[in-house]
Amino acid sequence: MDNDLGPWVASIVGTFCAGPENTLQDANREPAWGEPLVGFARGDDPLFEQYKDYVGPFHWTPLEIFRQSYPDQPASAKELSVIAWVLPQTAATRRDNQEQRVYPAERWARSRIFGEEFNNKLRQHVVDALGAAGYAAVSPMLSPEWRSTDSERYVYASTWSERHAAYAAGLGTFGLCDGLITPAGKAMRVGSAVARIPIDPTPRPYTDHHAYCLYYTHGTCGQCIDRCPVGAISEAGHDKARCREHLRSATAPYVERQYGFAGYGCGLCQTGVPCECKIPTPEDVAG
């Protein structure tokens, strides 16, 4: 291995995604996700301290979650790296969900449930592979200490945000609906791990956390507003409470009744919009 361990770690993620675990668990065993994007951030990146002000004081820094997980392994923030990945929805899943107006397509619901089960396996796989090579690692979302909490500013938030980790790792910026717009678009899931391993950080090609959203940068688009079936997106942003209510009270019974498994999902604001599968340009909404 050379001095830059980033490509090796990225290959751990990519190889696992190319394997049999990546499935919608449908009759044809279709892949749940396309080819992943992987990025890295330093454990002492100032953004993680800023998140304590922006998200809440409960949001972990990489050092906090590492020390919780490895209390007997002294470490400093500068010795840590954050590994983040983006799992893009497949073209078939996006195409199906573009046609929906109220409820998720079956592929989308499967990606939300079975695709996230795969994401958890990927999280653990990354931790195990790094550990086997001598690098202590933890996936914050798998920590028994991870929790969601009420937030006066954001309705609810959590002790670790995968999207904020991906933002720090140069993988995307936030849109009007709160989704992360990445080079593979907004129709995706994210995951991350924190490890005591030296990795060159991925350059962040942005300084504005809304840099890829046409609504914020050009005052145009806003197509996700009309895509939401319950009016949870407006020019003021994303109404998390209304969104969650739709997921729980409407989509959950629909998925079980129509598709035959316990689940939920929506994703309408992530499909049928210019940022669905790429970083949008002003030309995408011109005319």
Image (cartoon, rainbow, N blue to C red):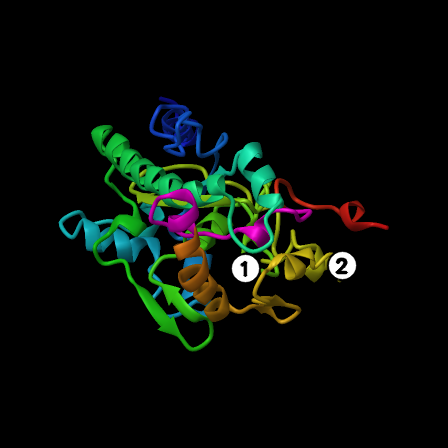
Q: Position of residue 217 (x, y in %)?
A: 71, 58
Name the residue nearer the viewer: 86 or 58: 86
Q: Main secondary structure of the magenta part?
A: loop
**Which residue is disc 1 drawn over?**
178
Number of numbered callouts drawn: 2
Question: Is 280 colored magenta in this rendering?
Answer: no
Q: Position of residue 153 (x, y in %)?
A: 46, 75
Pick the quarter of the image with the N terminus: top left
Q: Position of residue 62 (x, y in %)?
A: 33, 53
Which residue is at a point 48% across and 51% down the rendered structure image? 168
Real-space CA distance between mark 2 and mark 1, rounded to the nearest whole angstrom: 16 Å
Question: Residue type at mark 1?
Answer: Asp
**Which residue is disc 2 drawn over?**
220
Please state the extent of the stretch shown in magenta in the rendering: 255-275
In the rendering, which numbered label is found on residue 260? none
Q: Are marks 2 and 1 in contact (CB under 8 Å)?
A: no
Name the residue nearer the viewer: 18 or 12: 18
Which residue is at a point 50% across and 31% down the rendered structure image? 34
Secondary structure at badge 2 equals loop
Q: Earlier in the sequence, mark 2 or mark 1?
A: 1
Q: Is residue 235 left or right of residue 179?
A: right
